[in-house]
Image (cartoon, grey):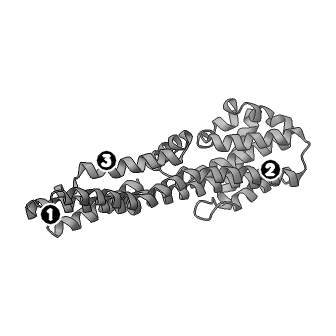
């Protein structure tokens, strides 16, 4: 929602100010300029990106229209999932969580917390690590290295789409100049025309520069920054899982492990300790009832 509001403010301010100065809005509607700049931007994106990146870009940009999924309530569900898993493993042994790791889509624990269950990256990260723990053959320091490596690669992959958008944004002013130069070339071919005709063609050429700069700093770069922010939120969410698992792997009690995970959450999204106690008590009752 903030993305749409932001774009509305940007366009409203520019168009409104232009019209307040007596500008004719129809002058800015130059279809040929849109085709030149938009087509060149799309072509450069396709040249510099893989098909997977283009598809992911569309999904990620559309995802910005939805609220950030990594909210305080999402973290509460995550801490509850971790506690139930750790509590079950402490009471029944690691064998008690094997079914949840092997078949996460059938897990009764995951089904109770849909915000977590819908996050395929988080589910995969958690269950893959639990499978490693089930082998019982990996030292704690090696497990830490594996998790850090996994998150590092995931974080790098998350930077691909914002970088692609930023690259296109950097190129848009240049494409705007290209469109303007082409407009000037056309104008020179009509140099003997009336002043009104020449003025119209020069104005149309300058619209290309305007569109290129606006597209770069009013659209592409803000979108890239928004995607980077969403990526940092996802990384923080995954890091919370990492901290909790490492604490459990070294033998800490379930409540201690989720407390470590809670402390890894940024303050604005972090549940209080009282809230943690409430959700762990509820999770303990649900685990006992399911046993």
Closest to the camera, between mark 2 and mark 1, is 1
Secondary element under disc 2, as helix, strand or loop, is helix
Kindly identify which residue carries mark 2.
Answer: 146
State the residue in front, 81 or 279.
81
Any mark on residue 199, and which?
1
In percent of width and height, residue 225 lies at 50, 60
Label 2–label 3 contact, CB within 8 A: no
Q: Counting residues from the N terminus, which is met first, the one under dot 1 or under dot 3?
A: 3
Apparent side of residue 121 relative to residue 14 in the rendered image (left or right): right
- Badge 2 crowding class, 10 Å Cα cut-off, few under 14, some 14 to 19, many 20 or more, is few
Residue sitting at x 26%, y 49%: 32
Residue sitting at x 20%, y 62%: 202
- Badge 3 crowding class, 10 Å Cα cut-off, few under 14, some 14 to 19, many 20 or more, is few
- Residue 211, compared with residue 280, is above or below; it is below
Kindly identify which residue carries mark 3.
Answer: 35
Apparent side of residue 121 relative to residue 26 in the rendered image (left or right): right
Secondary element under disc 1, as helix, strand or loop, is helix
């Amino acid at each position: 929602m903030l993305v749409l509001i932001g774009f509305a403010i940007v366009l409203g301010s520019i168009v409104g100010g232009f019209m307040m100065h007596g500008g004719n809005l129809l002058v800015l509607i130059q279809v040929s300029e849109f085709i030149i700049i938009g087509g060149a931007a799309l072509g450069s994106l396709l040249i510099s990106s893989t098909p997977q990146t283009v598809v992911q870009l569309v999904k990620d940009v559309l995802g910005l229209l939805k609220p950030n999924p990594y909210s305080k309530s999402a973290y509460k569900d995550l801490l509850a999932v971790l506690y139930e898993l750790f509590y079950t493993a402490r009471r029944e042994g690691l064998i008690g969580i094997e079914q949840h790791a092997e078949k996460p889509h059938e897990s009764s624990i995951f089904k109770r917390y849909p915000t977590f269950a819908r996050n395929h990256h988080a589910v995969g990260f958690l269950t893959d690590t639990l499978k490693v723990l089930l082998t019982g053959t990996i030292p704690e320091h090696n497990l830490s290295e594996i998790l850090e490596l996994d998150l590092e690669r995931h974080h790098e992959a998350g930077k691909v789409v914002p970088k692609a958008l930023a690259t296109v944004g950097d190129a848009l002013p240049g494409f705007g100049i290209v469109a303007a130069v082409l407009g000037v070339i056309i104008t020179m071919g009509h140099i003997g025309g009336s002043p009104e005709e020449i003025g119209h063609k020069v104005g149309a050429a300058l619209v290309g520069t305007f569109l290129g700069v606006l597209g770069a700093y009013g659209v592409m770069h803000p979108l890239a920054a928004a995607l980077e922010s969403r990526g940092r939120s996802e990384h923080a969410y995954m890091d919370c899982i990492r901290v909790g698992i490492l604490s459990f792997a070294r033998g800490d009690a379930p409540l201690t492990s989720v407390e470590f995970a809670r402390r890894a959450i940024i303050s604005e999204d972090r549940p209080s300790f009282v809230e943690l106690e409430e959700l762990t008590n509820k999770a303990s009752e649900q685990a006992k009832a399911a046993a």
